[in-house]
Amino acid sequence: MQTTYLKNVSTLTLNVDKCIGCGMCVVVCPHNVFALQEKKATVLDLDRCMECGACQTNCVAEAIYVKKGVGCAAGIILGVVKGTEPTCGCSGGGCC
């Protein structure tokens, strides 16, 4: 079973044109967000992304962007770790 976070809130973007097909994103992603198809990275499920930033940090082609450590996934994780209410900074009814 794959972990899914909140729907349609991840900041992850992949520029396939810049991708060189090295596969590092596939190797370092803890939630199997990426796969290689036809020698290029592809996003399997954006909602699996926890915005850890491992993919961006390890992408030598600079084809991946994600605001690591921010967003709803990070807010939920920090809430669990700290034992507080999850907060992601969303305004007006919060996504968390």
Image: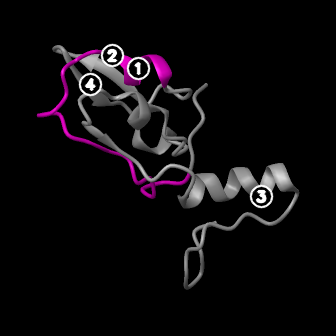
Q: Badge 3 is on which residue?
A: 79
- Compute the Cα span from label 2 to label 4: 7 Å
Q: Residue at x 45, y 53 (%)?
A: 67
Tell me whether circle 2 and circle 4 mark residues in contact (CB < 8 Å).
Answer: yes
Q: Earlier in the sequence, mark 3 or mark 1?
A: 1
Tell me whether circle 2 and circle 1 mark residues in contact (CB < 8 Å).
Answer: yes
- Is residue 36 depicted above or below 55 in this figure? above
Mark 1, Cα crowd under 10 Å, few <14 / some 14-19 / many 20+, is some
Label 1: element kind: helix
- Is residue 48 depicted above or below 66 in this figure? above
Q: Is residue 8 left or right of residue 76?
A: left
Where residue 14 sits: x, y (%)? 27, 40
- Compute the Cα span from label 4 to label 3: 32 Å
Characterize the magenta stretch by its predominant secondary structure: loop
- Compute the Cα span from label 3 to label 1: 27 Å
Residue lying farthest to the bottom in this orientation = 92
Instruction: Give the label on residue 41, or none.
Output: 4
Q: Earlier in the sequence, mark 4 or mark 3?
A: 4
Q: Badge 1 is on which residue?
A: 26
